Amino acid sequence: MKSSKTAWGLLAPTLIILGLVGLLPFIYVLYVGFHDWMIFAKVSGLVWAGVDNYRELVFDEDFLAALGRGLRFTIWTVSIQMVLGLLLAHLLMKKFKGRGFFRAIHALPLTVAPLVVGATWRLLTIPGLGPLPFYLNKIGIDYNIGWSAQQAFFTTVLMHIWHWTPFVTLTFLAGLSALPKEPFEGAMVDGANQWQIFRYIFLPMLKPVILIALFLRIMDALRIVDEVWMLTGGGPGTATRYVGIHIWRVVFPMTNYGYGSAMSVLLLYFIIVVCWLLLTVITQAKREAGT
Amino acid sequence: MKTYWKLVIPITLIVLVATVLGACVPAPPPAVEPPVEEVAPPAEVPTWWAEAAAPYKGVTIRGISESTPPSKYVLEVLVAPFEKETGINVEFEVTSWDEMYTKAIRDMEAATGIYDFVYIEQDIIYAYLAQNFLVDLTAFSEANPNLLYPELEMDDFTAFIDNFKDAEGHVYGLPFEAFLKVYLYRTDLFEDPEIKAAFKEQYGWDLRPATTFEEYRQIADFFTLWGKEQGVELWGSTVQAGSHPAAFYEMFETIFPSFGVYNWGINMENWKATTANGGALDSDRAKEALRYWVEMLEVAPPEARASTWDEVAASFAGGRAAQGWVYGENAAWIATDETRSAVVGKVGVALPPLYEGVLDDAKARRGYIGYYDGGAMGIPHSSKNQEAAWLFIQWISRKEIQGDFAAKTARIVRTSTFDDPLVKEMDPKVGGYYTLFKEHGDLFKGAPPFPFHAPIREVILPYILKAIAGEMTPEAALDEAAKAVDAELVKLGYGQ
Amino acid sequence: MKQSARRKGLKQVFLYIVWIALTLITLFPIYWMFLISARSRVELFSNRNLYQTTIFWENFVRPLFQGVYGQYVVNSLIVATGNTLLVVVLAVLAAYALSRYRVKGGQNIFFWTITNRMAPPAAFMLPLFLLYSRVLRIGDLQLYDTHIGLILVYCVFNLPFAIWLLKGIIDGIPTSLDDAARVDGASTVGIIRRIIVPLAAPGIAITALLAWIFAWNEFLFATTLTSVKARTITTGLVEFVTVVGTNWGEMAAMAIISLLPALLFLVLVQRYIIAGLTFGAVRE
C-alpha cells in the first residue's frame, strides 16, 4: 500500500541526529557505568567493576533518599501543573476581550531562563534580605527557607509551578488548535453543560496531548537542577537535594564518573518505566472509552 | 498556504536580524590602558616581548579562570596590550567557580588541549599534580631560556608560591591572586563610648576585637541584644552557613584551624579521619568547634542560613553584623566602595579569635590560624601552545603592573607590592588589611596538600549541612562524617 | 432571559478577576527582577520597597557595552533560531512518517525518540564533550565551540518533544485529505507542504515557540560545549556569580535583556495561535 521506504526516508535525518547526539553518548555512559572511575583517585582511569556500581546503588541511602525527594517534588508539581494548565487552556479557548493579552502574560515566565528564575526567587525569598520574608514577618508569619525544610520544599514547588505551568497550557493549546470544532458545536446544540463538554469531549480528545505534556513534565521535574540549586542549594540540610542535584554533585564536583554514570542509567531506566506504565494505562483507558 | 508563509516570515526575520546584529556587534571594545602602564617606559617593554614572541605571532591561546576581580582585570586591562605587543591572540574565558573546575578538569583529563593556561586555586594544585595535569614551569623555562622574561624575579614572589611547588621545588604555577580570610569588625560600634561603657559594665572587660572564642561570643551576644533594643537590624556575627560548599569551607578552613584542628582532621600519615585511627575529625575539639559555630547562628542575621561568601560580604557591607569572618578580597570593597557598601570607613581588620595554644602552633609551623587562599596560572600538559601561554602568564605576573592590580583587586603575590605607593595609600582605608597581610600572612595557610580535594569535601558537606539544619547534632554529624571519609579515602586508593 | 444575561455578566466579572489575579502573581517575580536590575548593590539588600523611583543605569550599561554580552545575545539568537528551524522541519517529516505510514517498529522508534530527553544530563556531558572535541574532528575543525554544534546538540531535547507534539496534531488531520491530494498527483513532500503544514500551522507555531524558548534558555550543554566564540547568554549569566559577591543587579539587567527577544518571539507567534484556535477547525 504505502511505501515504507518513503517513511524511512522521512525519518532518516531525525534518526541520524538523535543517534549521534543521543544514542552514542548513552552507549558511552552505559559503558562507564560498569567501571570504577574517579578522576582524583590514586589510580585514575577506568577499572572494570561489572555490576558493582548498581549493586551499591540499590543500597545507597543517600541516592534513594534523593530519589524519594525528587519523586515527592515531581508528584506535587506535575499534578498541580497539569490541573492548572488544563483549566487555563480551557479558559483561554473561549473568546473574550483581552484573551491575547492574558495569554501572552501567562506565557511570560517560560521565557525566563531557569538559572535566572532560581536567582530571582532566591532574592525574593532570601531570609533577612528578601521582601517576602520581610513582609510575611510583618504580618506575623515566620518564613525562613534556610531553616524550615517544609517551607523550602514548598517554595521550590511554587517556583516550579510558576515557571512551568505555561508550558502545559501552551502544549494543550497546540493540541486544541488541531481539534475539529464539530463535536463541540454538536454538544452545545444538544444542550450539554460546561462540565459535560469538558469531561466527555475536551478531555478524551486531548488525551494524546495530555500524555505528552505529562511525560515532559515528569521527566523534567525529576531531572531538575539549575533552578533549585540557585534557590536553595539543596538545603536546608538535604531537604531539597533532589535526585538531579544529587547526580550532578556526584558527577561534577566529586568527579566520580563511574558511579555517577550508573546513577544516570538507573534514573533513566526508572523514568522510562514510569512513562511506559503511564502510556500503557492511558492508552488502555482510551481503548475502553473508545469502544 | 497563507498561514504557512505568515509563519515563515517572522522566523526568517529573526534570523536576518540575528545575522545583521552579528555583523554589527564589534569585538569587545579595546580595554582602557591602566595608568601604571603609562608610567612604565614604553620603549623598554616592547623589545623583549615582541622579540620573544616573534615565532608565535598569530597564534591564539585560550585560558579559563574564575570570574573574580583579578581575572576581570586581566581580561579588561592586561590582555589587549599583550596582544598588541606580541601579536599573540588571547581568548580568556571567565566563568563561575564550579563551572571553571568542571571545564578545566574535563579538558585536562581528556587531554583535548582546549586550554593553554588555567587558573589553579591553591586547594586543588596537589590534586592536579598527582594527576600530572600541569607543565613543570621550572624545567620549561630552563629548556627555553629565550622565553624567560629577564625581569620576572621569581624571588620576589611571596611565600605563597611555595604552594605551587613539587617536592623538588619545581614551580607549576605563577601566583595570580592571594588573600587572607580575616576577622572584620565595625570600628564605629567598637569605638562608640556609650557602647563601650555598657559593654564593660556587662562583661567586665574593655570592648575590643576578640582574641578568644569566648570573647567573640560575648561580643556577638552583646550586639545582637543591642540591635534588638535599639530597633536596628544588627546581629553579632556573620556565619557562612548556606547550603553550599561555602559552609564547608568556613568550617574547615577557618573555624577548625583556629580551634586547633588542622588538615580537615585527616591524619596524613595513614589517610584516616577517625580518632580511632589517629585522625581528628570526630575528636572532642572538632565537635566543640562545630557546636560553637552552629550555635553562633543564634546571634547571626537570619540570612546566615542561606549565606555563601556572597551574602556574608553583603550582610557585613549592609551593616547587619558587628563582626565576622570575611574573605580579604572583599575587605577592600566593603571598606571603600560606596556603591556597594553602607559601612565605608567603619571597617576594622584583626587576627581571628583563637583557641589556646593555636598561635604557638602557628608560630612553630605546627599549625595555622586561618585561611590563606589564592591561585596561580599554570599550563596544562595537553596545551599545544605552551610557549605562547608561558609568555602570557609571565606578562600578567610582571612586577611593574602589580601596584595598580593590587590596589584595584585586593590581591598581593609579590613582596615588593606591599611597598607600592598605591597599596600604601589604600592600606589605612581598609583598616590596615595590607599591613596585617604583610606581617602575619605566614600564620595563615592554604588548604592541606591533599592529592584529592573536592571528592572528600562533597562527602563531608551533607553532614555539616545536616548539623546546621538541626537534622543531626554536631557531634553525631562529625562521627558519621569521619566514618564516611575513611570509607571514601579507601575507595580513592588511600589508607587501605 | 434577563436573568441569564445578568448571570453571564457576573460570570464575566468573576473571570476577569481571576485573570487579573493570575496576571499579578505571574508578573510579580519578573517585576522584582526588574527592581533588582534598577538598584545599586548597596540598595539591593537594604531597600525592600516594592517600587522604585531611580534607575541605576550602570547595571545595564556596563555589561552591554564594556562586556562581551552583546555577542552572547547574538550567539543565542543564531543557535536558538537555527535549532528551531531544523527541529520543526525534521519533526514535521518524522511525525508525518510515524502518523501515516506503517513502519516496522514505528511505535518503538516513537517511544525511543522521547527517551533521549529523559536522561539526567550530567553524566552525558563527558561523552558529548569528547565527541565534539575529539571524535568529530578534522584537523582544526571541530564542533566544539561552534554554533552548528549547539544547533545539533539541542536536537536531543527539542526534536523528541516536537515529534511527539506534532504527531498528535497530525493524527488529528483526516487522512482523506492526503488521499485526495495523492489522487491529484501530489508527491509526499507536496502533501506535507500543501495539506499538513497549513492545517497544523497553529500547532507548529506553538511547537516552534516552545522549542525556541528551550534552546534560548538552555544552560548545561552550552556551558559544556562552548568556550568563547559560541557562548550563549545563559552561560554568560553565571559570570556574575563571583567570589566577591554575585552581581545580582547586572545579572538581572542582562536577564531582562535576554528576555526581550523571547518576548518578541512570543508575541509574533501568538497571532498564529489565536488564528488557529478561531479558524483551525478542520475543513472537510
Image: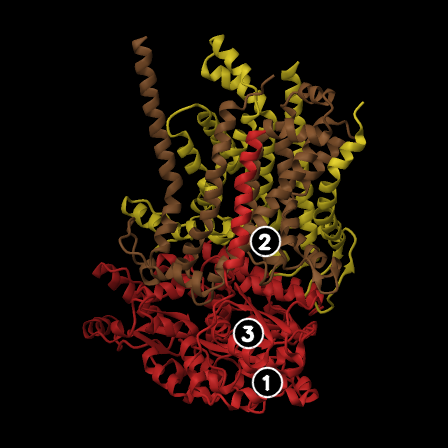
Chain colours: A yellow, B red, C brown
Secondary structure category for the residue under label 1: helix
In the displayed structure, B455 sits above or below A204; it is below
- Provide the chain ID for the residue under circle 3: B
- Reading the image, the residue beneath label 3 is B447
Seen in the picture, residue A76 relative to A47 is either above or below; the reply is: above
* Amino acid type for the residue under numbered disc 1: Ala
Amino acid type at mark 3: Ala
Q: Are marks 1 and 3 on the same chain?
A: yes
Q: Which mark, residue C220?
A: 2
Residue placed under numbered mark 1 in the picture: B50
Q: Going by the image, does B323 lie left or right of B358? A: left
As measured in the structure, the alpha-carbon distance from the residue carrying label 3 to the one carrying label 2 is 29 Å
Q: Residue at x 54, y 86 (%)?
A: B46
Q: Give the Cα distance between marks 1 and 3.
A: 38 Å
Looking at the rendered image, the disc whose residue lies closer to the viewer, 1 or 3, is 1
Give the quarter of the image for residue A194.
Answer: top left
**What kind of element bears circle 3?**
loop
